[in-house]
Image: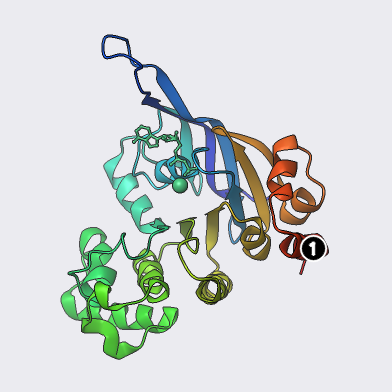
Amino acid sequence: MTEAPLIEAKAVTKRFPGRRAFPWQKAPVLEAVKNVSVSVPRGVSLGIVGESGCGKSTLARMLVGLTRASAGTIDIDGQRVWAGDRAVNRQARQRIQMVFQDPLGSLNPRKTVRQLIEAPLIGLTGMAAAERRVRVEALMDLVGLRPEFIHRHAHEFSGGQCQRIGIARALATEADILILDEPVSALDVSIQAQILKLLADLRQRLGLTYLFISHDLSVVNHICDQVAVMYFGEVVETGPTDSVLRNPAHDYTRRLLAAVPGDRLEALRTGS
Ligand SMILES: Nc1ncnc2c1ncn2[C@@H]1O[C@H](COP(=O)(O)OP(=O)(O)O)[C@@H](O)[C@H]1O
Ligand SMILES: [Mg+2]
């Protein structure tokens, strides 16, 4: 028996009005995401790789309901989401959350850690203030933020600490699916390793399901069980991470691998 996917996108497409060469022309249609289908079983971490502009963030935004798909469907736990039923969408918002690339830029610098982490609790649950405070403290402990930081403002923190705040906020409503859009790309390498370790531990401890977007194949190799390769809005190859990285079927995947520096490539090949 194959396990039912926890999140499944079927033939998802997103069209944007493209740029006109002249003002009197009709705007061309830009297909940022074309007919993409992905399916992630519970507890699995799926990597989405591909170069800048290939549609990764657009796909992420459709999955979490920040952008409406032009075509296609998205199901969470077998239920159609972002299709108009408000009660269903509200419940889905608690279960699927996004972690953004730019930890400093995605947090309002004037808000305190408490305000930032409890925002989804205020928006999506009926939790009372005292209860929210307890939950925020538990989340801070979970992501490794010291309790005395609770009244500090986001601008007082480093990139790595901000990403811990972003992860705590994403987990506030007990989401079981995280869409991580280049969550470590903006961080120094040593900090990257700490945040990747935190994400791996959290997945294990909480049984989370990840869609992990990255342009860095060594990061994907580290944290993803499966990988989907995107190229110009389409998924061109998908499979278990080790077979895709060690035995790529698609020409574009081979080119991505060829761009990885030698020592890192060696680590990918040997699976270390
Ligand atoms: N809101 C938007 N309006 C118009 N075009 C967009 C919008 N968002 C993204 N695009 C375009 O869609 C394509 C994919 O972008 P994006 O999903 O951000 O790629 P990636 O995250 O892989 O770098 C790009 O050509 C981008 O310019
Ligand atoms: Mg992006």
Find disc 1 in the rendering and name its residue: 266
Colouring: rainbow
Which quadrant of the picture is home to ligand 1? top left
Rendered position, 236 above or below 228:
above
Rendered position, 17 above or below 110:
above
Residue 122, quarter of the rendered image: bottom left
Does residue 1 appear in the picture of this structure? no
Is 249 on the left-hand or right-hand side of 66?
right
Is 44 on the left-hand or right-hand side of 69?
right
Rendered position, 179 above or below 15:
below
Is 48 on the left-hand or right-hand side of 246?
left
> Residue shown at 28%/64% (left/top)?
107
Question: Residue 55, percent across and down?
Answer: 49, 38
Question: Residue 12, percent across and down?
Answer: 49, 32
> Residue shown at 23%/80% (left/top)?
133
Residue 131, quarter of the rendered image: bottom left
Instruction: From the viewer's side, name the closer residue of 117 and 48.
Output: 48
**In the picture, which quadrant includes the C terminus?**
bottom right
Instruction: From the viewer's side, name the closer residue of 211 and 192.
Output: 192
